[in-house]
C-alpha cells in the first residue's frame, strides 16, 4: 500500500510541477489562508500540526477541506509525530487519518512493532506514512545507531518515506544510503534553519519542507516560486 501511495505522491508532484512542501506553521488563520492561497501554484503538499485545526477554529475535517480548497487540491500531511506503544499508535493514526489527512508523520524510535501499528492503520485507509529519521533542530539526540535502526525499520516495512534534515548534509546523505533509492526523503531545515535547497537535494532529498521562509515572506508567491525553481530538476522517479 505504501508503494502505491508513494507513486501517487510522486505523480501529484509531477502534475503540479513542484517538489516543495509548505509547512504552514502559523497560528494566525488569516495569515495561513493568505500564504497558502498565494503559494498554491508552487507547492506539491502542505504540512500542518494536529493543533492547527483547533487553533484556527475548525474541526479537522473542515480545516482539511478549506486547506485543499485554498491550495487547489493540495495533499495535506499531518505532522503528528506519533510516538507511543503499538495499541495507542494504531488508535491515534486511525483517529487522525479518518478525518481526511492524506498522510501522517510518525517517530521511529519507539521500535518496529509500534511503527507497524501506524502502518497497519494507514494502509487500511490507503494513506501514507512518513517516518522521522532525524530532526533538523540543533542538539537533537538522534545518534548514528538510532538513525541506522530507524532506517532499517523504514526499509523493512517499506514506508512511503522518511523525514531527514535538509540542513545536515552528511547525515542526510548517510540516510539516503541507508534507505535506498525507492523510499522518499522529505527534508525540513531548509531556509530559516540554515539549509541550502540545492545542497540538500544533492545529498539525497526528494522533497523540501519549507515553512518560515515562505510563511514570513512579504511575498509568499514569489518566495515559493523561487524555491520551486531551485528544486525543479530534482523530481524523484516513480
Image (spheres, rainbow, N blue to C red):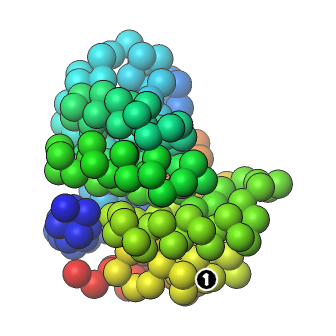
In the rendered image of this protein, does residue 222 appear above or below residue 31? Answer: below
Residue in view at x 44 percent, y 84 percent: 180
Query: Would you identify the image quadrant in which residue 135 lies?
Result: bottom right
Q: Is residue 20 left or right of residue 84?
A: left
Q: Is residue 179 left or right of residue 44?
A: right
Residue in view at x 54 percent, y 86 percent: 177
Give residue 207's position: percent from left, percent from top: 43, 68
Crowding near pointer 1: few (<14 within 10 Å), some, many (20+)? Answer: some
Residue in view at x 22 percent, y 31 percent: 98
Is there any visible trace of residue 129 in the rendered image? yes
Q: Is residue 58 left or right of residue 193?
A: left
Please identify the residue farthest to the top as the structure is shown. Answer: 57
In the rendered image of this protein, does residue 123 appear above or below residue 201? Answer: above
Residue in view at x 30 percent, y 28 percent: 95
Dot 1 lies on which element?
A: helix
Q: Is residue 167 left or right of residue 86?
A: right
Give residue 136's position: percent from left, percent from top: 67, 58
Give residue 138's position: percent from left, percent from top: 79, 56
The quadrant of the rendering that contains the N terminus is bottom left
Query: Residue 123 versus residue 46: which sits nearer the camera?
Result: 123
Q: How many marks?
A: 1
Is there any visible trace of residue 201 in the rendered image? no
Query: Residue 25 versus residue 84: which sits nearer the camera?
Result: 84
Give residue 91's position: percent from left, percent from top: 35, 30
Residue bearing the label numbered 1: 173
The quadrant of the rendering that contains the C terminus is bottom left
Query: Residue 140 versus residue 222: which sits nearer the camera?
Result: 140
In the rendered image of this protein, does residue 112 appear above or below residue 166? Answer: above
Amino acid at each position: 500500500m505504501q508503494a502505491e501511495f508513494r507513486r501517487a505522491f510522486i505523480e501529484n508532484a509531477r502534475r503540479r510541477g513542484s517538489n516543495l512542501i509548505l509547512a504552514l506553521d502559523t497560528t494566525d488563520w488569516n495569515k495561513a489562508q493568505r500564504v497558502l492561497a498565494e503559494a498554491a501554484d508552487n507547492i506539491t503538499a502542505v504540512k500542518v500540526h494536529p493543533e492547527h485545526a483547533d487553533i484556527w477554529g475548525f474541526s479537522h475535517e473542515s480545516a482539511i477541506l478549506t486547506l485543499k480548497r485554498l491550495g487547489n487540491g493540495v495533499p495535506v500531511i499531518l505532522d503528528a509525530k506519533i510516538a507511543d506503544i503499538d495499541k495507542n499508535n494504531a488508535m491515534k493514526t486511525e483517529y487522525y487519518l479518518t478525518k481526511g489527512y492524506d498522510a501522517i508523520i510518525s517517530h521511529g524510535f519507539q521500535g518496529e512493532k509500534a511503527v507497524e501499528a501506524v502502518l497497519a492503520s494507514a494502509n487500511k485507509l490507503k494513506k501514507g506514512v512518513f517516518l522521522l529519521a532525524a530532526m533538523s533542530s540543533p542538539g537533537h539526540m538522534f545518534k548514528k545507531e538510532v538513525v541506522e535502526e530507524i532506517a532499517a525499520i523504514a526499509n523493512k516495512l517499506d514506508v512511503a518515506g522518511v523525514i531527514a534534515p535538509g540542513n545536515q548534509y552528511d547525515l542526510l546523505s548517510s540516510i539516503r544510503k541507508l534507505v535506498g533509492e525507492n523510499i522518499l526523503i522529505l527534508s525540513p531545515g531548509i531556509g530559516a534553519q540554515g539549509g541550502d535547497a540545492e545542497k540538500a537535494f544533492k545529498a539525497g532529498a526528494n522533497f523540501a519542507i519549507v515553512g518560515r521562509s515562505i510563511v514570513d515572506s512579504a511575498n509568499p508567491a514569489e518566495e515559493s516560486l523561487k524555491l520551486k525553481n531551485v528544486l525543479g530538476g530534482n523530481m524523484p522517479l516513480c
